[in-house]
Image (spheres, helix red, strand yellow):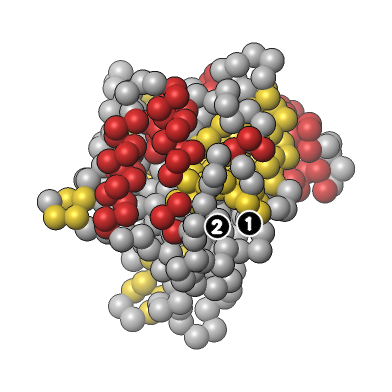
Amino acid sequence: MTRRERTMRPPLGSLLAVFLKGAVRSAPFFFAGAATAMQPGPQLPDHFEKVSYTDLAGWQQDDHPAALTSFLRFCDPAVTVPEGPDILRPSAEEMTRICVAARAANDGSATAARLFFESRFTPFRLTEPGFVTGYYEPEVAASRTRTGTFSVPLHRKPSGLEAVTGESRPENWPAHLSHGRRTGDTLSELPDRGAIMDGALDDEQLELAWLADPVDAFFIHVQGSARLRLTDGSVMRVGYAGKTGHPYTGIGRLLVKRGEGTPEDFTMAGLRAWLAEHPDRRDDLFRENRSYIFFREVTETGPQEGPVGAAGLPLTPGRSLAIDPAHLPYGALVFVASGFEDPDRTGTKFARLVVADDTGSAIRGRARGDIFTGSGDAAGKVAGAIRHRASFTVLVPNSKLSGSMAATD
């Protein structure tokens, strides 16, 4: 999600990302999760099932110009997408042709936008059941300095924080730790949430901003970004900067397991209500989610833009999807259909083409996604109510398919 407890920033691949900067240069845009490398006439993963656009209920009614605008962010020559597993890499010429066609179709015509997708991509449905949730950018009051009212910190990342990859993983490093802290040649474990709550980082003066409510702070960790309305009248946007690397544990799921309620009881609003009713149990519950997020002040995007996601791009409300990078990469076009009501079309079930441009610690699995709903309380209400089964259909570039596999309708 932004990088959140759900959307945090490990290095990822890109399903379609070859970008221009002066001379054409390429970044990977490929499938991650395929069992074998794709050669000409590629063997797609077994869980990819070719379908037609006519099979996609709601496809014709979608706002294709909005989806195209979101997709075009990946054609910006100034954008560099983090690289990932090199399974499928189109040539610079292939990406150039796709982006030229995308720009030509971006004339406001719904038909032109739809035909761009239908002529350049083939839909493949993921055969296993999917699940989708929502996330948003909170807006809360805050202070740059600690006061009697504002005493709950958001922390900057500590020095030496780094992701533990295959190349940097020390012998005997715990498998559950994705990050560590390097001092010289030594990589050590960072304190977890409980230790930080007890003051483990207090001497390092890492406080970026101070909030009034520990529940607000916790949910900002979950969402991975926030707009802070500061006491001096200014606004600060904060975003993901790193994490301790300890596993994420959903506290709502813990409460369900303990018989405190059903999954339907613990939407975001329901979880906030439970925390308000049980202040004596709140902090102990927070400690059970050992993952802890660090933040930075975000200055590269304007207030009218969304928070920056894991692909380094401002997120698009209703069109940005956080995915598991082990299975789907940045730049993937995914048609998501689910049973909840589309927030922009009363009485219509959600069925939209979205762009994979974010990730998160709680987003795991081939058919798992998190939809960015926007900023502020209204977006939060929409996001908090989304916990639904869904179908996921990935649009594969025709340039990487043999003639018999490409779309024909």
- Label total for image: 2
**Contact (CB < 8 A) between labels 2 and 1?**
no
Residue at 69% from the left image edge and 46% from the top image edge: 130
Q: Secondary structure at mark 1?
A: strand
Image-quadrant location for residue 269: top right
Depth order, front residue of 237/367: 367
User: Which quarter of the rendering shows the C terminus?
Assistant: top right
Quadrant in which residue 29 is drawn: bottom left
Which one is in front, 172 or 45?
45
Residue at 29% x, 22% y is 234
Which residue is depicted at the point 73% across and 48% down?
A: 129
How many residues crowd mark 2 within 10 Å: few (<14), some (14–19), many (20+)? Answer: few
- N-terminal label among 2 and 1: 1
Residue 29: numbered disc: none
Residue positioned 84% across, 47% down in the render: 258
> Could you tell whether 297 is left or right of 70 in the image?
left
Give the crowd class for mark 1: few <14, some 14-19, many >=20 residues within 10 Å.
Answer: some
Q: Position of residue 217 (x, y in %)?
A: 51, 37
User: Which residue appears farthest toward the left when viewing the image?
Assistant: 22
**Disc ID at residue 48:** 1
* Residue 167 makes an appearance in the image: yes
Q: Which residue is mark 2?
A: 404
Residue extending farthest top? 346
- Residue 316 can be seen, yes or no: no
Q: Amino acid at mark 1?
A: Phe
Amino acid type of the residue that numbered disc 2 sits on in the rendered structure: Ser
Q: In the drawing, does residue 380 fall left or right of residue 88?
A: right
Q: Nearer the viewer, mark 2 or mark 1?
A: 2
Q: Is residue 112 above or below residue 130?
A: above
